[in-house]
Image (cartoon, rainbow, N blue to C red):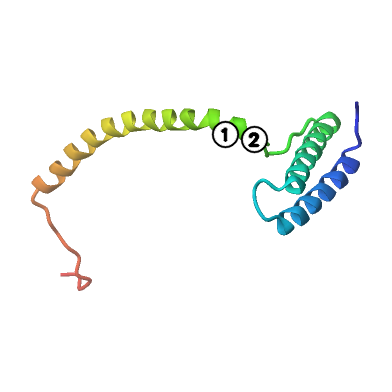
């Protein structure tokens, strides 16, 4: 189904406005009106993203996450940070050696701005 990107954009903007209204009137996370507006916003965004891609081969730089997606991805994020720690440990050893060489050269000249 090919949807006109301009029409999909108008529907997305309307869904954003409905979501804002529901959010501003909401009294909590379990508000059925907010849930419905969130679902409509998600659907409108997906339709716009698809229409834009179908028409121009361009995707939006946004991703819609489900509540289930957040739970599954949390552990993966920390796994990536563990990998970074391994690289930092290797770099720290090299930096320590460089610092000790600088202190041993004895050329501690400080420019005081007078030229002397």
Residue 91: x and y, percent?
28, 34
Residue 37 vs residue 33, the one in the foreground: 33
Q: Is residue 79 above or below residue 104?
A: above
Residue 107: x and y, percent?
11, 53
User: In what element is the residue under mark 2?
Assistant: loop
Residue 36: x and y, percent?
78, 42
Quadrant where the N terminus sits is top right
Q: Earlier in the sequence, mark 2 or mark 1?
A: 2
User: In what element is the residue under mark 1?
Assistant: helix
The Cα–Cα distance between marks 2 and 1, rounded to whole angstroms, is: 7 Å
Q: Which residue is mark 1?
A: 70
Residue 76: x and y, percent?
48, 28
Q: Kindly indicate the quadrant of the structure image that contains residue 3.
A: top right
Asked whether disc 2 touches disc 1, contact meaning CB atoms under 8 Å apart, the reply is yes
Quadrant where the C terminus sits is bottom left
Q: Kindly indicate the quadrant of the structure image that contains residue 69.
A: top right
Q: Which residue is mark 2?
A: 65
The residue sitting at 81% across, 47% down in the picture is 15
Q: Kindly indicate the quadrant of the structure image that contains residue 44.
A: top right
């Amino acid at each position: 189904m090919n949807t006109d990107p301009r029409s999909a954009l108008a529907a997305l903007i309307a869904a954003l406005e409905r979501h804002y209204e529901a959010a501003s009137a909401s009294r909590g996370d379990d508000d059925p009106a907010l849930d419905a507006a969130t679902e409509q916003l998600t659907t409108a965004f997906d339709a716009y993203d698809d229409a834009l891609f179908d028409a121009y081969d361009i995707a939006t730089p946004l991703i819609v996450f489900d509540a289930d997606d957040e739970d599954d991805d949390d552990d993966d994020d920390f796994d990536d940070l563990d990998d970074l720690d391994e690289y930092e440990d290797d770099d720290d050893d090299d930096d320590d050696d460089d610092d000790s060489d600088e202190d041993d050269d004895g050329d501690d000249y400080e420019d005081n701005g007078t030229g002397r």
